[in-house]
Amino acid sequence: MPLAIGSRLGPYEILAPIGAGGMGEVYKARDTRLDRTVAVKVLPQHLSAAPEIRQRFEREAKTISQFSHSHICALYDVGREGEAEYLVMEYLEGETLSERLAKGPLPVDQVLRYGVEIADALDKAHRQGIVHRDLKPGNVMITKSGVKLLDFGLAKAMAQPVQQSGMTALPTVMGSGQNLTQEGTILGTFQYMAPEQLEGREADGRTDIFAFGCLLYEMATGKKAFSGGTQASLISAILRDDPQPISQIAPMAPPGLDRLVKRCLAKDPEDRWQNAADLGSELRWIAESRSQTGIAAPVAARGRKRSWAAWAAAIALGALGFTAGRFLRPVPDAAVTRSSIDLPPQMELDRWSSVALSPDGMMLALSATGSDGKRGIWVRRMDGFKVQPLAGTEGAVNPFWSPDSRSIGFFADRKLKRVPVGGGPVLSVCDAQDGRGGTWSDEDVIVFAPSPFTGLSKVAASGGAAQVLTRVEHAGGTHRLPWFLPGGKRLLYFSGAQTSDPNQESAIMGLDLATGKSTLVARENSEGRFVRPGYLAFVREGNLILQPFDPSSLKVTGTPIPVAEGVAFEAFRWIGNFTFSNTGRLVFQSSEAIRRSRLTWFDLDGKELGQIGEAASFFTVALSPDAQRVVATVLGSHNARPEVRLYDLERGVGSRFTFGEQGANFPIWSPDGREIAYGDAGSGIRVKPADGGSEGRLVLQQRTNIWPLGWSPDGKRMLLRIQDPNGGGVDLSDFPLDGESKPRRLFATDPSEFVNGAISPDGKWLMYVSNETGRQEIYIVPYPGLGERRQVSTSGGTGGRWLGDRAILYVQPSDGKFLAVDFDERGDSLRMGAPRSVFGNKVPPRGVFDVTRDGKRILIAVPVEDSSSAQIRFVSDWRPELRSK
């Protein structure tokens, strides 16, 4: 029965209840003799009813009260009031580790700090012959001074000796979080029990070490090391299974922590750490190594010595300042340390905003496509070797960091999202149709560009409705790439337009969030970022420039100074691929880093038939109707806009087809092969003779992103992909080429972003790709009059192409293989066949492709093996060199 406030247990006055559990009720109380606040735990009657149990408990309590440790909750007194047995303990303010884990995993520095403290407490107790036996998050209190272990050693003292061995003594029902330290049962809480406990064998200090491994795992990942839907499956997991490696859930965790925890969780006690002292020393070594950017710091490891070779390796890495992917190539410099990093094989960085250093300079986030063809966020520690994918970021672009370096914001699935780098769930913050950059303030506010042609918006980082901050004034105008200034009251952003209108100049602007007023900072054709202690960073003619800048007045002063040359810059998006930390580190992608490919013929069985011409960076390819020529978008250098080139496949030579356009892209052939249509950013759709004899004509003027996808066989219509200037996504439209009609939106609903489409060779069907179901799939529908649509792909599909008149070829994203689906017309309906393998069931080279009209050959832009998309440069500290200039 709960105690009344104001009642007494001996000299202890009850002030308030604190909590209750299987081991009794806990109250805040006042020691009337010493006038101090204490915690009083009243034990359940069944644990103290038998005289022999009570005597055993009192002996154990006396032993525990005799030693003192800063991370063990002190036991002050043991008492009995009537039939009530109670303990008097140190009163602690804080939260239990269990309560903290309900919010997600802990930062790595806290995992290591608390781990060291717990290991020290275990070592102190084990040396005095006391084993906890019920180490779990609920028995760890987090206070301002560190952690405190609760109920140390009392589980054994208060429990009836087990009369049965093995699992027959286990209860038949286990509720979530239920404490199973009951009379006649095995001691401990299931998910933290060592195999020897489950099997009824004798427990010792190594039993606590197993539970400690479970604690470390859960602190680092936010997930329990072992789980099961039933009691039996949980027991089986503990006895037989190994948990998923920490590095796969929390890529930012130190590699040494994975190894340490794995050894803690060994099934055989002989294979575990044999004492908590060595375990604590190892944790200290990991923590100190992290703090010194790859240098393994000395540790007082109770007699254990690091080998000379290990120290030599650590010193070498520290001298270079950066451990880089597979190879580290230092570039000598008198003022700063420079090096390069190669990405893992087959990984390809996004071409814009794909590198982001954490503010503390300890981690690098990369937006890239892995060897499996999937795009996402990858992270690597600056003191580590591995580049790890960040779970839940599939399809992500434009990563940016929280000010505390613990979370990453990004755009995916038409949402602004965030994810903790230490592991944890992904949070959808708000809608963002096609994000163009974000920035995160110290006040936990995110400002972002939700789409290419709208203004900026802001939203709480915890999620909610976004509030519009700025609006563009001209069609085709854009506000994007925001960057918070110190204090979070002002920010920088880029204002420009994808148009040839000379009145719409590009500029770096400053925005006062309180007044909503925008101020011109600099007339630059590049984004601007603030770099501590007071510089504006931007790209000019391939050089990364720093210019003194006052964030309070939003004015630049002094002389622009180059700090790096050959920096990758996407002129079409005004963005440079560079990133600074607050600690002086600089990472950027070289303008030489471009993935080159060579046009290669294959038959449908995957047999290579020959290569064509020199390697280039192909973005799109389109075969002429007679398969004698190909028109392609080529990206050239990072500092140039895309251009269209025309290749003679028989001679293997290419030539420029467009000159001076704002940004030419997505060229397609007319049905007779005499003309080529393409999108001219800022102007509209342009059609030119394939022989290049004239400048051609503008068939549709529109100052937003608009690209042709297909041309009907009769030459009278085009299929267009149009970006909504108001942020409504991307639509497919039908455009009659009669000189009078306007594009007609084909789908009245707004289900998704349409990413591709093509008209069948006979002009009767439209194939398109949409992600309205949450993933990209291939669909087919009658054209131009829309009727019943049918889904072609069954497990995701991209890159659809017509394979003759009655088959569709596409790529299955899960494995990158080519599949084809045949169909037959049955009156007004279709009969769809099952997907069949193409390319000999092999994975084709990852690259843009097209198919000949007869459906017998495939032309693929195959990446050149010696071509590097990485070439990431690292500068350990740019500040000394800047001072010298």
Image (cartoon, rainbow, N blue to C red):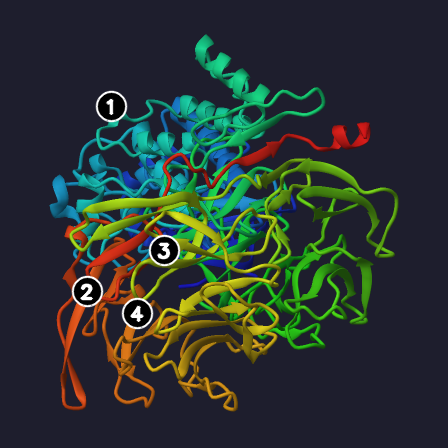
- As measured in the structure, the alpha-carbon distance from the residue carrying label 1 to the one carrying label 4 is 53 Å
- As measured in the structure, the alpha-carbon distance from the residue carrying label 4 to the one carrying label 3 is 18 Å
The location of residue 836, given as percent across then percent down, is 14, 62
* Amino acid type assigned to the residue bearing label 1 in the image: Glu
- Quadrant of the image occupied by residue 441: bottom right
Numbered tag placed on residue 848 in the rendering:
3
> Can you identify the residue that label 2 sits on?
820
> Can you identify the residue that label 1 sits on?
270
Answer left or right for 691 relative to 663. Answer: left
SS for callout 1:
helix
* Amino acid type assigned to the residue bearing label 4 in the image: Glu
- As measured in the structure, the alpha-carbon distance from the residue carrying label 2 to the one carrying label 4 is 13 Å
Front disc: 4 or 3:
3
* Amino acid type assigned to the residue bearing label 2 in the image: Ala
Q: Nearer the viewer, residue 458 or 368?
A: 368
The location of residue 606, given as percent across then percent down, is 19, 49
- As measured in the structure, the alpha-carbon distance from the residue carrying label 2 to the one carrying label 3 is 17 Å
Front disc: 1 or 3:
3
